[in-house]
Structure formats: C-alpha cells, structure tokens
Image (cartoon, rainbow, N blue to C red):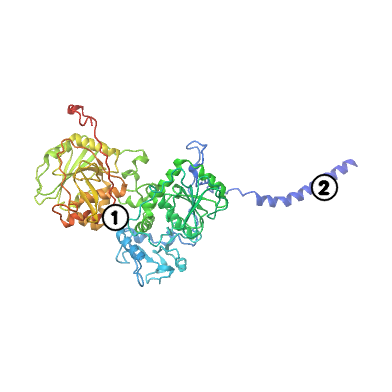
Amino acid sequence: MQSWRRKSLWLALSASWLLVLLRVFPLLRLAVPARPRAGAPQGWPRWQDTELLQSFSQPGELPEDDPQPPPAPRGGSCDWGACFDVSKCRGGGLKVFAYPVAGPISDTQRGILASIESSGYGSVSPDEACLLLSLEAPAGECSPLPQQWNGGRNHLVLGLHSNFCPQTFQLGQAMVAKASPTVDTFRPGFDVALPLLPEAHPWRGGAPGQLGQHSPHPGVPLLALAEERGGWRTAGTESSACPRDGHCEQDHGPEQTHPGATLPNATFCLIPARHPDALHFLQALQAGCIPVLLSPRWELPFSEVIDWTKAAIVVDERLPFQVLAALREMPPTRVLALRQQTQFLWDAYFSSVEKVIHTTLEIIQDRIFGAPAHPSLLWNSPPGALLALPTFSTSPSDFPFYHLQRGSRPAGRFSALIWVGAPGQPPLKLIQAVAGSQHCTQILVLWGSEKPPPSRWPKTAVPLTVLAGQKKASDRFFPHRALSTDAILSLDAQSSLTTSEVDFAFVVWQSFPERMVGFLTWSHFWDEARGGWGHTAERANEFSMVLTSAAFYHRYYHTLFTHSLPKALRTLADEAPSCVDVLMNSLVAAVTKLPPIKVPYGKQRLEASPPLAPGGPDPQPPAQDCINQMAAEFGYMPLVSSRLRLDPVLFKDPVSVLRKKY
C-alpha cells in the first residue's frame, strides 16, 4: 500500500514539473539571446572613447575582426554603388558642371561657383562632367529641376542654409550636401554633411583659430554653455553645474552671460542636441573650445573622413553629473591634444566657404578613386587632405609632413636644380662644388637662355642632365620627371657655394623636411603709408623668406606650385621673375604655418638682389604689387617671420677646414 502511494506521489510531482517546464521553456527562449549562426562574423565592440580606456591585453592578443558588410543606408535606399555611375569619371577624373542659377544670384552662390572654378574640378560643359551640381535657392526656396535631371543620377544638390528645401529628399538618386542634416535623413557614404555656416562667413582665407587669444589660464571658466539666443554662458571651475539640455539646474559657482559674444572663452563647450545649436559647434572649433555634444541629433560635418573623436566629445545628455566629473578629471595632455585638433580642423576645412566646397568635392573624388586615395592620416593630420594631393602620391611616407609621426627620416640624397637664364654662362664652378657633396645624386641644369647650351660640360662624379627650353620663371618649379629624390637644392647660375656649406644645409633640411632651408633672406612688412605689404632685402634680425637661388626644399612643393597655386599667381611669376621667391615661400608657409630656416654662408659671397618693395627707388608695377596680389589670392598674409639661424659647430673658430666636421 505504501509503495503504491509513493509511486502515485512521484507521478503527480513529475506531471506538475512537466507542466511547469512546458510553460517556462517558451519564456526562456525569449529571454536568452539566440546563439549566433554558424559562419556569422562576430566583431569586437567599437568604443568611441578607446583612448580613455585602460587595456589589459597584450598587443596581438585579441583576434582580428572579420570584414563586416556595410551598414544599411539610412534615410533612403540609395548608396554610392547603386545611384552613382563612376564610369563617367574614369577618363578625366572628377569634373563638375554647375547649373546656372535661376533668378538673381546671391553672394553665397557666387562664392560657391568661384570655389568650384578655383578647385580645378570645374567644367564648362555638362557632357564632359561626371558630376552635375544644382545649387539650392536662398531662404529655403525650392529650385526647379534641371532639364538633364535623369532621376538625379550623378547629381549633387548643395545648400549651405539651415532651412533646406523639403523637396530635396524626394530627389531620387541625387546626392545631398546639406548643412547639419539629421541622422534620420542622412545617407552615410552617399550624402555629404556640411557645417552650418553663418551668413557672414568669409568666402576665401578666413579668420585663423583663436586658441592663442582664448587659452584659459587658472581661474578662467571651465565650461561654456550654448544658449538659445546665440550667446554663451560660462561657469567656473569649482561650479557644480548640471548640464542638461544646455541649462544648469544647480550651480553654486560664478556665472557670466555673454549674449553678444561670438566665441566662447572656456576649455569645454557644452552644445545641446537641438539643430539650431549646430552653429555653436563651428564657433567652438574656431575658439579652440572642445565641443561636448549632448546626444546630437544631427550628423557631424564631413563625418565620412574626419575622426571627430580626436577633436570633440559625444556624451549622453541623461548623465549630466557624470559628464561634468569626467571633464574635470581629463588629463591636461588629452585636453591639449583635443584643442590643437580643433584648430587644425577649423583652419583646414571650415574657415572659409572655399574650403568647405573644396572638401566636399575632395570627398567625392576619394569615392571615385577608392579608399586609398586619401588615408585617414592625411585627412586628420596637418596640413590636411586638401594640401596632400593624391595625384602626387597616396602614401603618407612620400609627403614631407608625416616623418615625425611615422618615426622616419628623409633619404640622405638630394638633386641639384640649377636655373641658367641670361646671359647664359654655364656655372662650371658651382657644378663642381655641388657635385663634390657626398649627398648629391644628380644635377639638372634648366637652360632658359636664348643662347644654345654648350655641347660639352665638365665631368662630374654624378650624372648631369641639361633640360633646354625652360624659358619661363615658373618652369624651375615644374615637377620634372627627371627628379629622383625628395630633396631639391634650387640654385641660380650666379650662386656661389662651397661643398661644406651644401652638406651642412642638407643635414639641416633632413631635420626639417617640410620647411625651406636657405642662405639668403628677405623680410616682409606692412607699409602704413601705402596701405599694403612690402618686402625688403635689408639685413635685419628678422626674416620671412629665403631665396630660391640657394635653398633646399621637398620636391612635393613643385607639384603644389604647378597644380594648386592659382593660375593668376603663376602668370604673375612669369611676368615678374622676382616674384617666384615670394610665391614659393608663401606657398610653403601657407601649408606648414612655419617660417623658413636660415643657414650661414662663409664669406657672404651671395648677394641678394633687392626686391622691389613699396617706396623703392625704381619700382616696376608688376613686381611691386606681387606680394599684395599674393595676399589677395590667399585671402590673408601666409608668411611667418623668424629670428632663428642654425650655425654649424666650429663655423667661426679659426681652425683648419679638416676639423670643421659639418
């Protein structure tokens, strides 16, 4: 009897457990995540603040991620491969035709058209272009569709206004370049996110970054909060502010409101998620104030190529106390790196309308060429992708700007480029002195005289090549295929140098490959009486130019001079040969933001021909205004002054030449 009862009890318990399990199993299947399917790649998480996280793994310990498929486009079904015909751009690269503007043209539209023309991508015929550009009408008006619309294929609709035409997003296969688009409508890899520019944004040049004038010292406010009426509200470093939607609920520290101030004076700038606050983002960049974006709902400008984790901070607006505590504890080195990056990005891509348009076209050009056209290092490191032409190279090691970051050094060889003009006397002594250098690998003579070059030249230890017919002054800066080294020693036939001076100048250049290293100097100045710039050869403690009659520089500047310098300036150099020194120095200074380097020459055998500055004894109109035309084309004065001269050891000591080891 008892055994039967025990069996009945066990049967009842088993049946009840079975019913419970049948009811619970479906819930477990919903709560437990499904296992990954076989063959599905599982990548490691991508943290936006990886630089702030401590790593406990050794290099190479984590497995490499498998290639991930591209994310599905947001805001529409168009992507680069489906809605853009790249075959039309294969022949001559990117060529852009801008449709004529219907009705009266605005200053902004006129600036955009001029920027396209100066970029080198402009085309006068829609049949020759592979990208057709349609400019949005001002004040959010909708422009009529052009006749060659073709469903928007290979079209770009561009507008710098915040009130963009709502019809834009029904424009079929056309790309959209809009100021601060929302993340819901933006199509990554197809559309281009532009910055929200103010109405008075300069067309060319633009104001420099204000980090030097707005560098908070101890006691200067830590935070600047963007306000709806366009100003900034600052809070002290000891404040317990609560940044929520751009307002402080509890703040016991000192505050100041600057409704009329355009640039904040703080370390961090808190910017809410509202779309109108995108204009504050550009103000923070110019001021060198690190943007702290509170859950932004708009796409950051040029996010396809710019790594904003190096210049801005994106945080969750629901965690105000944690955000403030993290900003206070950020290391000073990290703060300095972020602020320096804001200044670089402002100057390289956002300081003028021209740079914004050129950056947009360069992004599309990179898509045509493919990913290797501009590596991320070129976009996110000085001088920027606009000044690192892919027609020269796509490898950072070929440019003079990235040796320090890569831990490399230029090769120990140079090519001598000797310009021979009138009266056409071959510089025999100069050739022998340069050929005796242990670093010289070849000598190129650019013969620009009316007389034919001599049939015989002195025998040298290095190859000597004569290029006849180089009569224009700008021909000396043409990227000749015969140049086989990165370093170029530019010389005139009247120059006189010793082998030891050449060797020392080259060693100095190897330490500063992005700069010009020369022997003779000029300086520029502002002439109050004439209201313009001038330059002089008078010896002084300050200089801003080295003469190309005896100077080292990187061969990449030949490519920039020929393909990037405005045509009007190259024509000016041919009309006034004395302008070549001003233009070459201005070009290098505009790229590097650094002055040239002067090295001494023993007995001062070189004589600098005095430039024709304002107020000179016998001015020639084309040369006299050379420096002012250059400044007008650049939009600012790029030359940088210096008082530094590098001397070799034992240069002035009365010892034998053999002991002067340069």
Q: Is residue 458 left or right of residue 27?
A: left
* Residue at 91% from the left image edge and 42% from the top image edge: 1
Q: Identify the mark at residue 634; answer none if there is no mark.
A: 1
Residue at image mark 2:
12
Residue 656 sits in quarter: top left
> Separation of disc 1 and disc 2 at Cα?
92 Å
Within 10 angstroms of label 1, few (less than 14), some, or many (20 or more) residues? Answer: some
Does residue 436 appear in this view?
Answer: no
Where residue 53 appears, as percent x and y from the top left, is 51, 41
Where residue 473 appears, as percent x and y from the top left, is 18, 52
At label 2, which amino acid type do we have?
Ala
Q: Nearer the viewer, residue 613 or 251?
A: 251
Earlier sequence position, callout 1 versus callout 2: 2
Q: Secondary structure at mark 2?
A: helix
Which corner quadrant holds the C terminus? top left
Where residue 349 appears, as percent x and y from the top left, is 37, 54
Residue 602 sits in quarter: top left
Q: Is residue 252 left or right of residue 261?
A: right
Nearer the observer, disc 1 or disc 2?
1
Q: Secondary structure at mark 1?
A: helix
Q: Is residue 81 left or right of residue 325?
A: left
Q: Please, which residue is most extreme toward the right here?
A: 1
Q: Is residue 296 above or below residue 662?
A: below
